[in-house]
């Protein structure tokens, strides 16, 4: 409570309309971000205000420290572009001030923030920061660098190396009695024990970490520990014990706007409910996960971060070239002084040649940079066009959902009122009204599927699989006498991406084939199998119904629609039917 009141006092005091001195700016920059129990937007405003105050008095160290804190906060919020900008600005100032301890820390943090986007680049920056810290024996920085370097080793599946660096970081933290940092080491070690299937030891270390973090009210750390304990139970296939822990973490991550942890919790809950054969809940949490993932990891953000890194590296190289040019010019001047009469003309020619060479190289570098900027502008223009198309899709889908969906629901309600509001209605008319109501309900389901496809520019195989599984689950409920089977070959790449047109047509063909088997074939067994052969997807829909004679039967709208949809996506469809049943094979890329 005392710590919380101190944080509130500092937060409200900095909003007063007087200029800050260096001591006040430093005290705010030293606040522990993870332990601040105020809204995330308020934390951002706090350090933005501190950055502004440092600029007003030209306090460069205070500016760099404020950038450091903003980079950390933006990273927790999933705002990677803002985090990268703050990191680069901070490093520039620290290098200018020759603050090697902060340079080491910043390079390491920069590497750590890229761990899931570009592991090779993350290791490069982490090793750069680690080398500076070890060369100068900066133990205060090394305790966190070793811990975070262990995380990269763990991601790279080097578990023994990960434990080695976690222990090195823990030893320094215990030496400094770092009560806030120690739980992070315990958590990381617990994660490795879990990967090594030593689940009891993993739980022991996670619980040690959680107990310490509850004392310090470290909201991010507490949420992470709940998720990690849930993962241990998932590894042991104790699904029902994992669910409440995931929900505890999700409550905190939503409240504190920890976007990365939020999307991960949604994905874990979807996986758990899938294991429990709860298709509706699995689909709901998967859709929540997809929504958060799309907002955090958009192409535009990735392009912007890549451009910032290119700009940062280019600026450093240009500075090195200028520095080298100055050194060469100084050496050349010294040579010319000593050999004025003998080598004057030769030295002048050498200088002119050297300058020409450097100018030529600089022009080449500039041309290469202009080309990259042009390519980036084209890519951004393309992304902007795609975003506008996506906005139009969303507008149309909202109109369909809000207007047509509401009107169809009103029609169903009106028909039901007619059926049950008049007692003298004939059986024939009642059956007709029931038929219209069922047709309208089916139209609503198809409208929802259409809206689902319109909202996505691309549909992953995982999305399509979830939608097909949900449809088959509803078909089971509608026909209790029919056995359904949905199998996917292990060679199928679940990360494959279809266009929205391809995904929707494949789904509609499967839907039409299953509905035909239920309506007309009187089938009591229906199988849907998906496999991959020679870079093509083979989708088989098989039933054991009464079949039909393909040579004599008149092709209805359903069969014609399936063939038309197959042609639209560049695929082929084959239909074989006999008295023993029907096989429909869709082959598409």
Image: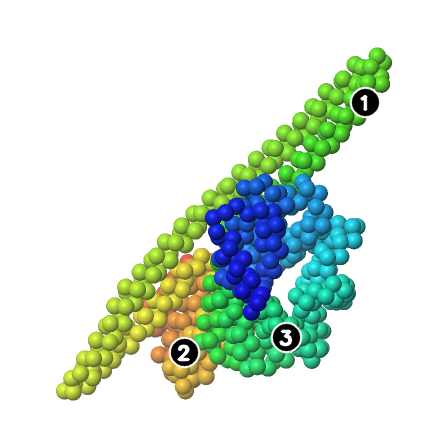
| Residue 324 pos. (x, y %) | 74, 32
Q: Residue 76 lies in what quarter of the image? A: bottom right
Q: Nearer the viewer, mark 3 or mark 1?
A: 3
Q: Nearer the viewer, residue 456 or 341?
A: 341
Closer to the N terminus: mark 3 or mark 1?
Answer: 3
**Observer-nearest residue: 65 or 546?**
65
Q: At x 55% / y 65%, what residue is drawn?
A: 4
Whether the residues at callouts 3 and 2 have beta carbons within 8 Å, the answer is no
Q: Is residue 256 left or right of residue 555?
A: right
Q: For the point 53% across and 78% down, which residue is it?
A: 244
Residue at which label 3 appears: 211
Q: Residue at x 71, y 43 (%)?
A: 98
Looking at the rendered structure, the secondary structure element under dot 1 is: helix
In screen coordinates, is 390 left or right of 341? Answer: left
Q: Which mark is residue 474?
A: 2
Q: Disc 2 versus disc 1: distance between alpha carbons?
A: 87 Å
What residue is at 71 percent from the left and 62 percent from the top? 147
Query: Who comes first in sequence, dot 2 or dot 1?
Result: 1
Residue lying at the far top in this picture: please name it.
Answer: 341
């Amino acid at each position: 409570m005392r710590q919380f009141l101190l944080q509130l006092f500092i937060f409200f005091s900095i909003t007063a309309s007087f200029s800050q001195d260096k001591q006040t700016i430093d005290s705010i920059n030293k606040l522990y971000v993870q332990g601040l129990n105020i809204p995330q937007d308020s934390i951002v405003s706090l350090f933005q205000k501190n950055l502004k105050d440092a600029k007003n008095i030209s306090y460069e160290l205070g500016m760099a420290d404020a950038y450091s804190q903003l980079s950390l906060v933006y990273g927790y919020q999933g705002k990677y572009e803002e985090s990268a900008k703050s990191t680069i600005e901070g490093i520039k100032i620290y290098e200018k001030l020759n603050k090697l301890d902060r340079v080491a820390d910043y390079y390491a943090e920069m590497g750590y923030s890229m761990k899931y986007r570009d592991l090779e680049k993350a290791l490069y920056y982490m090793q750069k920061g680690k080398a500076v810290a070890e060369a100068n024996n900066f133990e205060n920085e090394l305790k966190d660098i070793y811990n975070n370097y262990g995380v990269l080793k763990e991601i790279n599946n080097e578990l023994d190396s990960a434990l080695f660096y976690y222990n090195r970081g823990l030893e320094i933290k215990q030496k400094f009695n770092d009560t806030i940092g120690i739980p992070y080491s315990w958590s990381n070690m617990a994660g490795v024990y879990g990967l090594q299937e030593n689940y009891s030891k993993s739980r022991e270390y996670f619980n040690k970490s959680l107990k310490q973090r509850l004392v310090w009210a470290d909201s991010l750390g507490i949420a992470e520990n709940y998720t990690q304990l849930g993962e241990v139970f998932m590894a042991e296939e104790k699904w029902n014990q994992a669910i409440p822990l995931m929900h505890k973490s999700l409550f905190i991550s939503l409240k504190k706007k920890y976007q990365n942890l939020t999307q991960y919790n949604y994905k874990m809950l979807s996986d758990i409910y899938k294991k429990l054969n709860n298709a509706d809940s699995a689909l709901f949490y998967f859709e929540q996960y997809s929504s958060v993932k799309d907002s955090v990891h958009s192409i535009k953000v990735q392009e912007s971060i890549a451009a910032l890194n290119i700009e940062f590296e280019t600026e450093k190289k240009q500075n090195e070239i200028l520095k080298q040019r100055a050194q060469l010019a100084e050496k050349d001047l010294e040579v010319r002084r000593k050999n004025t009469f003998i080598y004057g003309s030769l030295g002048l020619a050498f200088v002119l040649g050297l300058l020409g060479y450097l100018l030529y190289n600089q022009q080449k570098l500039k041309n290469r940079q202009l080309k990259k900027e042009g390519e980036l502008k084209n890519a951004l223009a393309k992304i902007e066009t795609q975003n506008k198309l996506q906005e139009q899709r969303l507008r149309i889908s909202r109109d369909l959902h809000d207007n047509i969906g509401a009107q169809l629901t009103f029609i169903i309600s009106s028909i039901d009122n007619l059926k049950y509001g008049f007692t003298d209605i004939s059986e024939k008319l009642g059956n007709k009204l029931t038929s219209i109501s069922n047709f309208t309900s089916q139209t609503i389901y198809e409208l929802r599927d259409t809206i689902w496809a319109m909202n996505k520019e691309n549909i992953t195989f995982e999305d399509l699989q979830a939608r097909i599984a949900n449809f088959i689950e509803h078909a089971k409920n509608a026909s209790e006498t029919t056995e359904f089977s949905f199998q996917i070959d292990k060679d199928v790449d679940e990360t494959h991406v279809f266009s929205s047109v391809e995904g929707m047509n494949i789904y509609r063909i499967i839907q039409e084939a299953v509905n035909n088997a239920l309506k007309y074939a009187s089938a009591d067994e229906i199988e849907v199998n998906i496999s991959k052969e020679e870079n093509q997807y083979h989708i088989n829909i098989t039933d054991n119904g009464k079949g039909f004679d393909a040579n004599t039967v008149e092709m209805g709208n359903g069969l014609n629609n399936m063939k038309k949809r197959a042609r639209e996506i560049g695929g082929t469809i084959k239909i074989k039917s006999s008295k023993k049943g029907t096989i429909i094979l869709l082959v598409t890329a």
